[in-house]
Amino acid sequence: MASSASPTWLRFKDAMRRHPTAIVGALVLLLMLLVALLAPWLGTSDPLALSPIKRLRPPSEQFWFGTDMLGRDVYSRVIYGARVSLTVGLAVAVLSTLIGLAIGLVTGYLRWLDAIMMRVMDGLMSIPSVLLAICLISLTKASLQNVIIAITITEIPRVVRLVRSLVLTLREQPYVEAAIASGTRLPAILLRHILPNTVAPLLVQATYICASAMITEAILSFVGAGTPPNIPSWGNIMAEARSLIQVSGTILLFPGIFLSITVLSVNLLGDGMRDALDPRLARRM
């Protein structure tokens, strides 16, 4: 009996076998997701509970990562902080990919709209993403939702330019020209003939956006422009610990390690997906 597996899936599995680091990245990311989901059960105490009498305790059996300047359990705050970073990363990756995909499909196919939208995207990309996010958040109230919206706006141009470049190539393909000649309407051409060929590059791009969004959120929180202090995040924890680095460096160390490991796992997964889904790389290997 012939195998029913698609060539893309077979190429993906083959690439995963050749790139064990991608498997490691996927497993570590899955572990971080489980930590975020199980934070109420994994945490040893309330991450917002204040206990000044226990302030700046070193790591011990009771406080695995020690306590901060207000006596809060750093371990519990780091565990709950995984929820914020992963929520921001995944939400920004999904939103920016969907919005950028819609804009890129239309602007890449309609030449008159392409000139207008690309100048807007170039203007957004000319501003450093962190600076643009700070400016957007300064216009609104500091909250997790506004952080996600601000970072999403900074990431949309990257997706738009990627999709536009793909559409510019795909719209010249014979099967697209044949669809036009047969009288197929524009929405059907975009959804049936062009959209499926953009999925693989977008999946890879989404992983890099997820990693970039987590770093940006940590930077915003570190400089005081991100999530409010009552929401524990890795950036907030490091921001509060920077003045105590000579007194208790572990407060800054542990959230930094968790952030680095999570971002690294996402990037490793993205590299593996790129090798698996790019036919040109597959042929070279």
Image (cartoon, helix red, strand yellow):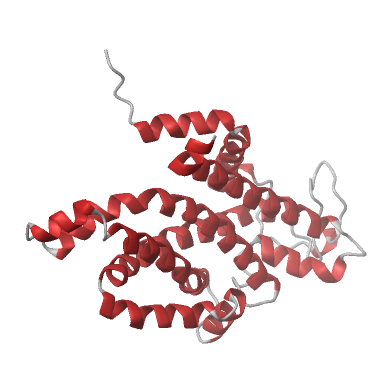
Q: Nearer the viewer, residue 219 or 196?
A: 196
Instruction: Please provide percent x and percent y for residue 148.
Output: 49, 68
Picture layout, residue 272 above or below residue 116:
above
- The picture quadrant where one finds residue 109 is bottom left
Q: Nearer the viewer, residue 165 or 99?
A: 165
Instruction: Please provide percent x and percent y for residue 107.
Output: 31, 72
- The picture quadrant where one finds residue 51 is bottom right
Judge from the rendering whether residue 259 lies leftward or rightward of residue 123; answer left or right. Answer: right
Query: Is residue 73 at least partly visible in the picture?
Result: no
Looking at the image, which residue sits at the far right?
246
Q: What quarter of the picture does the N terminus occupy?
A: top left
Residue at 30% over, 65% down: 105
Q: Nearer the viewer, residue 175 or 248?
A: 175
Residue at 61% over, 67% down: 216
Q: What quarter of the picture does the C terminus occupy?
A: top right
Picture layout, residue 9 above or below residue 216:
above
Residue at 58% over, 48% down: 266
Judge from the rendering whether residue 172 lies leftward or rightward of residue 54; answer left or right. Answer: left
- The picture quadrant where one finds residue 213 is bottom right
Picture layout, residue 208 above or below residue 52:
above
Residue at 43% over, 41% down: 279
Looking at the image, which residue sits at the far left?
183
Q: Nearer the viewer, residue 70 or 114?
A: 114
Judge from the rendering whether residue 152 lies leftward or rightward of residue 41; answer left or right. Answer: left
Instruction: Please provide percent x and percent y for residue 106.
Output: 27, 69
Query: Is residue 71 at least partly visible in the picture?
Result: yes
| Number of numbered discs visible in the structure rendering | 0
Judge from the rendering whether residue 104 lies leftward or rightward of residue 25; answer left or right. Answer: left
